[in-house]
Amino acid sequence: MSAEELNGLVRSWADGGYYNEGIGRDDLFDKVREECGVFGVFGIPDAAALTYYGLHALQHRGEESCGICTVDSARPYESFAAHRGMGLVKEVFTKEALDGLRGDRAIGHVRYSTAGSSALANAQPLVFKYRDGDLAVATNGNLVNAPEIRAELEAAGSIFQTTSDTEVIAHLIARSPLDFVGAAKAALQRVVGGFAFLILTNDRLIAASDPNGLRPLCMGRLGGGYVFASETCALETVGAEFVRDIYPGEMLILGEGDEIRIERFAPLKRRAVCAMEYIYFARPDSDVAGINLHAARKRMGSRLALESFVDADVVTGVPDSSISAAIGYAEQTGIPYELGLIKNKYTGRTFIQPSQELRERGVKMKLSAVRRVVEGKRVVMIDDSIVRGTTSRRIVNLLREAGAVEVHVRITSPPFANPCFYGIDTPDRKDLIASEKTVEEIRQAINADSLEFLSKEGFIEAVMGRVGAGAAVPVGAGVGVDAGIGAVGNVAGTGGVSLSGGVGTAAGGGGIGGRLAVVGGSVTVAGGAAGTGGAGASGTVGVGVGTGNAGGVGGGAAGGAGVGAAGIAGGAGGAGGAGGADGAGGAGGAGGADGAGGAGGAGAGGDGVIRAVGTGGVGVGRAGWRFDPSVLDLKGLQAAGLSPEEFEAALRINGGMCMACFDNDYPTPIDFGKPSRTCGC
């Protein structure tokens, strides 16, 4: 499809076509939503029950409808059965419904519609009769050229039963003169978009991922059989052992013997996992592309603290997806983390707001502010994203009504400015507040005292485990009692701290009556005794060798040791802090992998004579984020037809993530062969 044709489709979708109809635009909470979750079982008795538990673990990926299709390998052409319904997994699948699904093979689906209407006919798996028997299809994602293919097939005589874009795959397979595997491969080569497919017939199961791997799909082993799932948390739920991710452009065929047949229907382009999986969609106990979500979100919060520190009394996260990031922000700054917001888990999916007044009150039915925690306090509210801005405004006002004197909003993603065309339900671009307003205008709209978003660079580095983002990155000034906040990188008033780069750990006390400074080394002020120097921030992680930031300056004590972070060729360890009067210089930091150790600080006495010099650090460290044959499954890569070099190259742009919703190039067709224009990664 040409760029002009894709642009035409984008315009048609915006005018009310099949794609992104915005089913949830009237929802009380304006989060973007993942379309679906899929779960598959092959060669395990009572596959339906196993799939039920797997779908329950994936319920957060779709609450509109669900379904399970099963087949018994002992009677493959007599046992093909399916059950689908509108609602939650626990509502649709009664004991009677599960008893009617016999077999050792199954595929299941939970759905939140972004393409096609909310109706039972669109609930998946979609089940069909075709020339070779029975066929069931379940997918997570969207096919951006589905309207084009659908029109072509209808002109050739095909009759569609649903408005779901998934149905085009079944028609392409059914009309192909090739055998089932060949037909499936040809069909996958026709469609464009972000998808993870599970396709079940009477005797075979196919699992496939799009050429960029936008939608996650992984494989596990349980007993003598296999399990497939959109997230690893579902594998954990059923007791399966994680084997590996399904690689981009790969299809796995089960049912042709004891071995899994692996084929590629498309070459690996560049890996582009949806960034929103890391920000919001996936459960924190899941791993996506080998990265744990809880750990990644904590790093996002930590990096956000480095980029946009603000003096406050408590940090709180918007439940549930922002809790991990709030913990990271609190740990990085030393501001206490508190449960300032509590989520009511029993409001249900269909809470009705019959009037605007009740709609505004409705936020209190789902979220409550803990008055005793926030009253009279300066609050940092951490959230994962801002879509329309209505939710953020309601939560900020909720905190103010509970007595918060200041509410500072920090968002662990870049501004969400563009709709997604690859399987996320997002509103029209005009409804996305970041596409129409500046950060300052958004701050005013949500009634916050301050607002900051995580930078693109910071987001990528946090996801990939590179929080210490280079030398000379200014971190907010320290905080002193009665002195307010100092300028970035400068000394604040009483108890203030000057930083350049990362955050030190062991902080000293500030001046007399000064507050404990948790960021960086402390500074002697107003007659107060200075504490020991803090640890230097981590060294740069990335291609080449970076230099760690200097340790804090100790007053009358040893300077802190810089700690080099791991990376490609490792960052150099930070230089040890200079000692105070008569103090010894701090030890140089340890370098990252292959990185040089930092130089020790010089300990000058009060008369200017250097009394002691710290020692240089040792150039050692842990493995970095880059492709590592000892970590990734080489056998799996080779079976998929990928070399380690090809796979590593696929990760170089934007850390192997799709960040089109944060890009400023809209509505230009997304080019996965380049980084985001504003990112420079």
Image: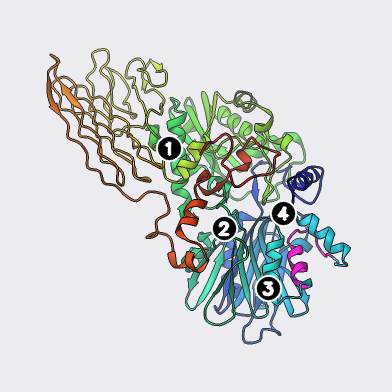
Q: Is residue 338 visible?
A: no
Real-space Cα separation, disc 4 to disc 3, in angstroms = 29 Å
- Residue 107: percent from the left, percent from the top? 63, 70
Residue 268: image tag: 2
Q: Is residue 169 magenta?
A: yes
Amino acid under label 4? Ser
Q: Which one is earlier in the sequence, the residue at label 1 or at label 3?
A: 3
Which element type, helix, strand or loop, lies under badge 2?
Answer: loop
Q: Are marks 4 and 3 in contact (CB under 8 Å)?
A: no
Please say if the residues under marks 4 and 1 sit with CB atoms less than 8 Å apart. no
Nearer to us in this view, 670 or 487: 670
Decide which of tag 3 and tag 2 comes sooner along the chain.
3
Residue pointed to by mark 1: 302
Residue at the spot 29% in from the left edge and 21% down from the top edge: 510
State the SS at label 1.
Answer: helix
Q: Position of residue 646 (x, y in %)?
A: 50, 56
Q: CA distance from mark 2 to mark 1?
A: 33 Å
Q: Residue at x 28, y 24 (%)?
A: 522
Q: Nearer the viewer, residue 581 or 573?
A: 573
The percent coordinates of residue 595 (x first, y second) are: 29, 42
What's the magenta region? Answer: 160-174
Single out the mark in the foreground, 1 or 3.
3
Q: Earlier in the sequence, mark 2 or mark 4?
A: 4
- Residue tagged 3: 182
